[in-house]
Amino acid sequence: MDRYQFYRACGVNLDLAVEAHALLRGATKQEIPGVKEDKEHYPQATVTTIHIFSATGAQALGKPPGTYITIEAPGLLTANPPVQEAVAQLLAQKLTALLQHLRVGPTDPVLVVGLGNWQATPDSLGPKVIGEFTVTRHLFQYAPQTLPPGSRPVSALSPGVLGTTGIETAEIIRGVVDRTQPRAIIAIDALAAGDLRRIGTSIQITDTGISPGSGVGKQRTAINRETMGIPVIAVGIPTVVHAAVIIYETLAKTGQGIERSPWVQNPNWAQGLVQEILKPFGGNLTVTPKEIDELIHNLAWVVGAALNQTLHTTLLQTKMAIPLH
Amino acid sequence: MDRYQFYRACGVNLDLAVEAHALLRGATKQEIPGVKEDKEHYPQATVTTIHIFSATGAQALGKPPGTYITIEAPGLLTANPPVQEAVAQLLAQKLTALLQHLRVGPTDPVLVVGLGNWQATPDSLGPKVIGEFTVTRHLFQYAPQTLPPGSRPVSALSPGVLGTTGIETAEIIRGVVDRTQPRAIIAIDALAAGDLRRIGTSIQITDTGISPGSGVGKQRTAINRETMGIPVIAVGIPTVVHAAVIIYETLAKTGQGIERSPWVQNPNWAQGLVQEILKPFGGNLTVTPKEIDELIHNLAWVVGAALNQTLHTTLLQTKMAIPLH
Amino acid sequence: MDRYQFYRACGVNLDLAVEAHALLRGATKQEIPGVKEDKEHYPQATVTTIHIFSATGAQALGKPPGTYITIEAPGLLTANPPVQEAVAQLLAQKLTALLQHLRVGPTDPVLVVGLGNWQATPDSLGPKVIGEFTVTRHLFQYAPQTLPPGSRPVSALSPGVLGTTGIETAEIIRGVVDRTQPRAIIAIDALAAGDLRRIGTSIQITDTGISPGSGVGKQRTAINRETMGIPVIAVGIPTVVHAAVIIYETLAKTGQGIERSPWVQNPNWAQGLVQEILKPFGGNLTVTPKEIDELIHNLAWVVGAALNQTLHTTLLQTKMAIPLH
Amino acid sequence: MDRYQFYRACGVNLDLAVEAHALLRGATKQEIPGVKEDKEHYPQATVTTIHIFSATGAQALGKPPGTYITIEAPGLLTANPPVQEAVAQLLAQKLTALLQHLRVGPTDPVLVVGLGNWQATPDSLGPKVIGEFTVTRHLFQYAPQTLPPGSRPVSALSPGVLGTTGIETAEIIRGVVDRTQPRAIIAIDALAAGDLRRIGTSIQITDTGISPGSGVGKQRTAINRETMGIPVIAVGIPTVVHAAVIIYETLAKTGQGIERSPWVQNPNWAQGLVQEILKPFGGNLTVTPKEIDELIHNLAWVVGAALNQTLHTTLLQTKMAIPLH
């Protein structure tokens, strides 16, 4: 039983396609039918783009067909403004290209959604990004003179989490989409990775939206083109790993052939083991570094800066000042 | 020009019907046609109920027809748990009666909306109340065994403010109402009073919802039965007064017959004066006590406790423990 | 190598004496010389009191001599007000007795210190407790008429964490102690447990203060009678477990005799394994439940209520209202 | 009775020396003995430097002798990154010169103190600045390899407010200074202005520290070279005006010669009038714009950026990455 099978068996989501792909391919780097991977190298980051273009590929990776771009920038783990600015610019480039590809024009209205729980630090990335970029939708009505020609109506929403609202996040967003008619959604979310080294250093951009069970939050319904009726780009950054990842690492590192374990006779052994160990909180346990507050603070700035560069080209060119709200 | 006319002329909202009524009646306590006022006295509080039952009354008070209950409890200004508990109980009583009157049954789903901006202390009452009571709507689906028979689905929403979202608050709420189909809304909001002594000591409960221009926030569209399609009860507590209130107090206290002022020749003088003085921020200036953070903290507890008592009768009786989210 | 040895070897702190004691005694429940344990049973909680009364006992448990009282109340894990009130009362009883034992009189000034980082949810218990009880020290000077006879000067401090201040927490507190001369310190801190079931359900009260390396924060210098010059009572609640706990659980549950492991030849194998697995963040990784924000919210209320009951007997009896700050 | 006399009579602090000076000089711009004023003009800002160099000047302005530099940048009122960067640079220049003038060398340890209450938005500037610049003091001990030669130990403290701690802010800071021995303090504080147009647009830098009664908080003891034993530079930005300012504006604008007022016979009339109007909250009422949260957010960035440029010259030149805390 390899890592990929283990994670699948015990319900650990691999929110990053790049991880799912790597694990699936394994040491032998076998090709996965229906999946294509490209790499680009930049001074501060590596970008891996995975295209899932068939149902076979989707099934194999456990992810819907579409494009998954991952920016990997280990420099994000230190307080390093030049790296942050370089990554923001790269993220803006990728977002701009993806919007274009989805035929979302430069003045088409966009709704940015900050998923997650602002009161739980590791899950607060989405809500913290709201406030780090400029919203303009209301200015078209209330202060159009502050907007240069070619501006885009941008709105923002921080819907909260199921435990606080009692409402599926997807329901809230769809309700707002129906009333306000944006042309696309950009959803920001904290993700769970399958490897500690991904925390705070990888940014995934995908045109497939948010799939059930992803993220640190408890979104149960997908937020994607199907459920929303418009394209949904998701920007996700791992801020935790599931506690089961530590369990796997332990099994792997202690070299005890999982195959030699007494558990292995039971086909559900992985799931059972993880449940047994993590049961006090129903298995919902995440592993986070202590510096998580600073990490989120820095990452929210990076994503906010990228959103401004992506969504407000004319605004930034004219350097017009936006009134405070 | 009396206080009522002054406030009207220069755009100061009197969010409290009890204030509008008192000012309109003036020193002579004249009867206003179409308006009825009752008073009850409790050890910790006085309750004034105003019924506006005709278009004439509504026009006179500048408020839609309906019931406006105001609990006045000066004891809320100190940290005094017994007063807080007594007021919470009184508020629950009034809310319960109002729901009954609106034919909202004990198991009918209710959506609680926390209006305002959690990042600006005087406007953070609504968002802070979310989190001070129990939501149950999701438990009906995910953990029904934790709910005693006769429980009510309660959901909650903190929609944010126009300046942060770019979307009218009413649009967000209506979108969520359409998707989740509650039977009634209870909207919590920070209000502006016309008298400093109202700050933190008066609680208004009304079945008329939130009217345009009310509140510290910038809600421009009404949130009421008409716009939402279901009954909307608003619970509002003044946390600020508009700066123009200080201007009026000054004019009144210095006894200079406003009629003798050189300004008085200009029919728009009141508005002009206020604009002239407050122009640096477009007139959007509010007066707050320094203890506002503690005040909000205490008031959020009072409203949250009242919501639990109102919405979760069976839950409280059975003393069942609700799982954390 | 048993759990106790494993934790010691790889630097996992057992902040709870009750855990250290249990693990040390092992399955055979052997007596540890110099350590005495008593148990009391209450409807909502079990209380275990451990006295370490000799250097041998201290060395064995890795904790300074003194009294360690642990309230265990699994009911704290749900939102259950009656349990919370019962635990607050129990905590107040134990604190009162401990103060008495330390010869801190009912009007002696006490400084409450909220340790930890309010921006990182799992570490925010201490700062959140500040604000949940009444401070009175300044009233003796500025508003003595609001204080009934027999009142106690209570002050509070939230010193922040080393990474934010660049200063050892102990230095900040000692500086304030020197200037303000309290008779005792009560320090509130989030702890790390050695067992997931302890998270949010155990409260430790000790007269030995905070020892180096304890807590989720990065306090490096002890905060105790020696470093502060006055008695220090610490109230700690586990909100995380170190990620190494999951590693141990995995090894233990998969039954692979740790003794059969290839690692075992290396005396540092446990430490090596843990470092190897957790290296991306220098090993500083903690495991937390997702509901941590609610848990902290509820626990802060419990500790604040207990502090009011402990420190403000006359204030509560006279039910005098304290002015807002 | 002119504005200056009015403010003095009714206890309104003019925290900005530039305001006190202008009001004192009056329309005729008379020279004040012992006070010298210089102006510099920059594209984004005007800088006024006032030197109070005699006891006469100090008495006249109600401020201790020293240097008061005020940067006035109306552009700070809009969300305008280039203006913010220009002002940060200007602030850094002035801080650098002042430190030099006070003979604080480039590697001398500096303590930055964020005064105010992070839970009350208008008073949260100081605490919000903490976290917007780099602290390094602890790295000298724990990670010296991350510091280039010529680095400066910088520490930070957010002491809280009297109402929350029960301790005078000056006591807390002095305690920490005694333990940690910095060579200078830079104290950040929200101020009260005497003119609404100053809110969010003026930054005062002074080598005289914080004087009693200044600021939005309730600091009662001075924080200056005398009380701290080391130089104290204060950086203050008005975020409110006292409500009495609105009272004066009203009297002034309605042109009713204050001298003709019936109040004028009573020498204490101004104080009496203000107390009468503002009594519900003991006069402690402040006027704030609604956008205060955004204003503070932007200003905290500006001050934080200036502190980094001032205190970490070598760090910025070498572009070394600082580890997260």
Image (cartoon, coloured by chain):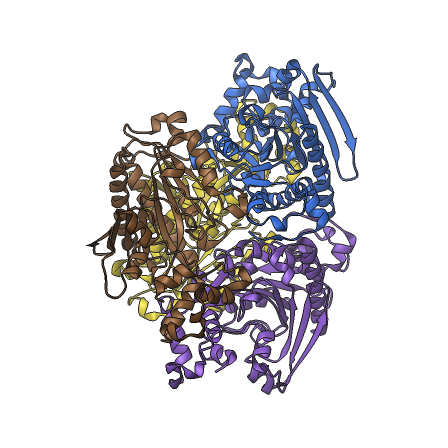
Chain colours: A blue, B brown, C yellow, D purple
Give the camera-side residue of A248 and A22: A22
Residue A218 visible, this orientation:
no
Q: Is residue D218 above or below residue D265?
A: above
Give the camera-side residue of C209 and B164: B164
Q: Is residue A238 left or right of residue B325?
A: right
Q: Is residue A308 left or right of residue B41?
A: right
Measuring from the top left, give residue D79's x and y in whole percent.
Answer: 63, 53
Q: Is residue A31 left or right of residue C227?
A: right
The residue drawn where x is 44% and y is 77% is: D10
Measuring from the top left, give residue D130's x and y in whole percent.
Answer: 59, 57
Residue C264 visible, this orientation:
yes
Classify residue A182 by image quadrant. Answer: top right
Give the camera-side residue of B260 and A216: B260
Measuring from the top left, give residue C179's x and y in whole percent.
Answer: 49, 68
Measuring from the top left, give residue A196's x and y in whole percent.
Answer: 63, 33
Q: Is residue D130 above or below residue C25?
A: below
Q: Is residue D123 above or below residue A22?
A: below
Viewport quadrant of the N terminus of chain A: top right
How many discs mark residues in the rendered view? 0
Classify residue A152 by image quadrant. Answer: top right
Give the camera-side residue of B285 and B308: B285
Classify residue A10 by image quadrant. Answer: top right
